[in-house]
Image (tube, rainbow, N blue to C red):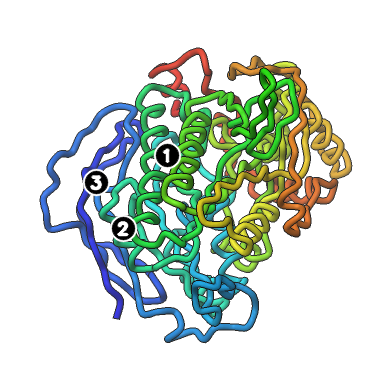
Amino acid sequence: MAQLVLVPSTLELSAIGKQCFKPQTQCCMVNSTTLNLRTSKFPLKRVTFQRQKPLRSSFTVCATALPIGQDTPPQPTNGFDQSSSRDSSKRKRVMVIGGDGYCGWATALHLSKKNYEVAIVDNLIRRTFDLQLGLDSLSPIASIHDRVSRWKSLTGKTIELYIGDICDFEFFSAAFKSFEPDTVVHFGEQRSAPYSMMDRPRALFTQSNNVIGTLNVLFAIKEFSEDCHLVKLGTMGEYGTPNIDIEEGYITITHNGRTDTLPYPKQANSFYHLSKVHDSNNIHFSCKTWGIRATDLNQGVVYGVRTDETDMHEELCNRLDYDGVFGTALNRFCVQAAVGHPLTVYGKGGQTRGYLDIRDTVQCMELAIANPAKPGEFRVFNQFTEQFSVRDLAALVSKAGEKLGIDVKTITVPNPRIEKEEHYYNAKCTKLIELGLQPHYLSDSLIDSLLNFAVAYKDRIDMKQIMPSVSWKKFGAAQVRSVVA
């Protein structure tokens, strides 16, 4: 028999999305069990309709069922707990926070296929951002309930689902104690630099949501399971673009005749990136103080949409963002090419970053889980496979488009960001390779696949969302209106 826990919280609605909330009964599939999810019997203390405020859920739902072993026998693949402090015959339990998002969904399915017991924790706010800003994924994505139900029907594997906000510690602690994870994979943050630079409310939301959420995860591990391994998604953007090589997390320096190994200097370039820096500092401190084990994965820019698992059925399809707020460079270029829009290179186009395929993201997560940090250790891995400038990517897409008979043009547009447009960039990324990462390097065939994917869904492309709409300088309500216009 499934159990349902409802935790009331404050509802805040945004006028941007022209949304209204009506308490109602909803039906969803969780662990293949039909549950009636109702709003709390407690009256809402306040309902505010205020411009530019991000929406938080009016209630949080924690849905659990009988342990997976009672309806799905373990399969002898990997995913078994090798820790000496635990029963090695049991499958590892991995809680994926933000498991409805771009990286989180692909990772949850990959780990489930690898025979880990998986739970997703998500407040579904990424979908709300689309409603607020009038955006949409290029690929149609099913509801989270339909997604996990379809996965169960195809594989026989159950993904447990906890719908709620990790900034609500009452909710998260209940979910954590219910699932008892061996590892927490934390994707559950507002992940867009442009979103964080739109206006004051979104900057505040980004920092409070990301920093408080991570603190709640740390306190849950400390209070309920100190041996739990935290695998946290960071970003290469924490480092900025220094005129020296970027090491993996730490740098050894000699100053005035003394030598020490210190955290690598951070030069974040948005309120989003700054929130990631704060996360890293808080996690590092918690590891030193409480003996928590953590791995910080400073990820580069992700491209692609397909993994073996998401390709199994259309209801498992991952999202692909192409707009100027949430879209990443290569994905955006492929969508622009598909509809005959010139590729929009910001400024001089020399901005160089680390990139990786979504298939390598899920590999890296699996490797970090299978090779956990030691108690008290704060590991930092740089998670990317190749470096490209924006000009490089535009040239690659143009070349691939020609082979497909697509006339791809490139234009230079004023850079909406405050950043170096020509700079030195050489980041190290050896630790994941040493653990066994087998990279999927960017190839003509991969770009062809992305272009064909974009062409297949080009009737869903909103041309108004292609150009950049958020400026680092023009901070405030005016540019929010330009996004939703």
Question: What is the residue that sits farthest to the front in this orientation?
Answer: 257
Quadrant for the N terminus, please: bottom left
Within 10 Å of disc 3 (Cα), the crowding (few <14, some 14-19, many 20+) is few
> How many circles with numbers are drawn on the protein?
3
- Residue drawn at x 41%, y 27% is 203
Q: Which residue is mark 2?
A: 173
Counting from the top left corner in percent of width and height, residue 83 is at: 55, 70
In which image quadrant can residue 33 be found?
bottom left
- Which dot marks residue 210? 1
Q: Secondary structure at mark 1?
A: helix
Looking at the image, is mark 3 or mark 1 earlier in the sequence?
3
Q: Secondary structure at mark 3?
A: loop
In-front residue for pair 393/410: 393
Q: Secondary structure at mark 2?
A: helix
User: What's the amino acid at mark 3?
Assistant: Phe
| Residue of label 3 | 21
Q: Residues within 10 Å of mark 1 (few under 14, many from 20)?
A: many
Question: What is the number of the mark on residue 154?
Answer: none
Rounded to the nearest angstrom, the CA distance separating label 1 from label 2 is: 17 Å
**Side (left or right) of 441 relative to 272:** right
